[in-house]
Amino acid sequence: MGSLSLEMDFEPSPMTPRSLAAMTPRSLARRRLFPNVDNKKQKVQQSGAGPRKNLQLEVMEPALNNAGPSLDTILVNYLDTLTQRVNYHLGYPVNICYDHYATLAPLLQFHLNNCGDPFLQNTVDFHSKDFEVAVLNWFAKLWEIEKDQYWGYVTNGGTEGNLHGILLGRELLPDGILYASKDSHYSVFKAARMYRMDSETINTSVNGEMDYSDLRAKLLQNKDKPAIINVTIGTTFKGAIDDLDVILETLKECGYSQDRFYIHCDAALCGLMTPFINNMISFKKPIGSVTISGHKFLGCPMPCGVQITRKSYINNLSTNVEYIASVDATISGSRNGLTPIFLWYSLSAKGQVGLQKDVKRCLDNAKYLKDRLQKAGISVMLNELSIIVVLERPRDHEFVRRWQLSCVKDMAHVIVMPGITREMLDNFTSELVQQRKVWYQNGQTNPPCVGEDIGAQNCACSYHKIDYICP
């Protein structure tokens, strides 16, 4: 990226009606936050090409005569760096394509705390529980459960949703065994450790989906104890979707009645996608809870999520807290009151039609990237109904950091979020193709074989390429 130069060359930059109309919400927000700096033109040496440097900051004492850059200068340069790096954010599931932060920025002057049960009012007015309940009602309708039959809250992220859902299962079935595939999110296994639960790790197929024969074998092996099952709707790395209907049928065939199992659905990324493709998540089925991450597909500046469960289950966690004049069944107690407003605003501005368009565009763009990589002779896999494109791990760590890729073993992945454009995908593919010519030019080093990781049919290494060309 090159380091940011903090040397300033100020020139007046007066605002006119025309220039004001041309400003983006991001630049307007910057002008409001840093008026003393933003009204000037700054000479800053920067490039969005490489990862940002550690700023090596210290907390400043206002009474001292600090010789270094001002607070506003540091923040403006930091903001500029982040703005450039947006176009190189391909490896993690965060939707950074939203423009409502400037509209909602005035709310930052208030401390909003949604402490306690969202359906009970607090003794103070600085909360957003009315917005929160509106968001919860929207998701309850999406996942087909009546208003008087559900309970939920806006969490601090998908991990808290998993911790809450699995805790509900444990409280309902204290001697239950937690079953989760090895490709489940790490927070599921964290919950097992935190709650001192017996657990079984279920094998997965090469695409990351749960191995139902292994699930069956372990259910039968532990038939004397109830089952608490984590169903992943979109695995973290490969985007595989566990088949809820097959799991329910397996439980039935293994002799588990509905009062002897609890199902938590971890739908962090795909919970806002699958309802518009395949209505697999529904409380009309015997599931106990569903959680999503609000900052992922929908998008929010702060990490957040939504957890929905059956109202009849929540009494197992509810505690009356006199101090806050409320009942609390949440994990965190104090909760960010801003995030429900951001979620409410996003859902209201976009609507189901807008979300459906986002889903289609992301699926189309994921297939576009997969086809381009495949045509270039690069090992690549894309699961059905997924926006996660898994490919061979780039050889150069700097390339991985430049594009902010997530890597596991010899694999990397690109998550095609709503803010990812085809231009970004083309730039990534073109650069990867050019770099591979450098990495593997002398023939002494070959691209990794990922046949065992993504399937032999998806591996373009010399061995598997010949194997599939010459059957």
Image: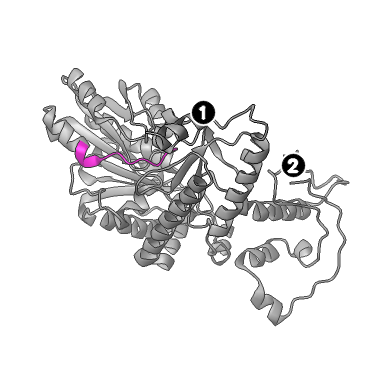
Residue 69 appears in the rendering: yes
Dividing the picture into quadrants, the one containing residue 108 is bottom right
**Quadrant (top left/top right/bottom left/bottom right) for the C terminus:** top left
Quadrant of the image occupied by residue 254: top left
Residue 451 figure quarter: top left
Range of residues picked out in magenta = 237-246
Disc 2 secondary structure class: loop
Q: Please, what is the three-letter code of the amino acid marked with disc 2?
A: Leu
Camera-side residue of 431 and 210: 431
> Is residue 242 inside the magenta stretch?
yes
Compared with 201, 355 (above or below) is below
Residue at 53% across, 58% down: 422
The structure residue drawn at horizontal position 33% and vertical position 42%, both measured from the top left corner, is 233
- The nearer-to-camera label among 2 and 1 is 1
Image location of residue 446, percent across then percent down: 58, 30
- The disc, 2 or 1, on the residue closer to the chain's N-terminal end is 2
Q: Nearer the viewer, residue 260 or 123?
A: 260
> Mark 2 near mark 1, Cβ–Cβ under 8 Å?
no
Local secondary structure at mark 1: loop
Instruction: Residue under label 1, please give it.
Output: 409
Q: Would you place residue 101 above or below residue 116 in this image?
A: below
Residue 217 — which label? none
Q: Residue 423 at x, y = what percent?
A: 57, 59
Q: Which residue is mark 2?
A: 55
- Amino acid type of disc 1? Lys
Q: Residues within 10 Å of mark 1 (few under 14, many from 20)?
A: few
Give the residue drawn at x 47%, y 59%. 342
Return the residue found at the far front: 470
Q: Residues within 10 Å of mark 2 (few under 14, many from 20)?
A: few
Left or right: residue 2 compared with residue 415: right
| Residue 227 in the image, given as x and y percentages of width and height | 22, 28
Overall secondary structure of the magenta section: loop
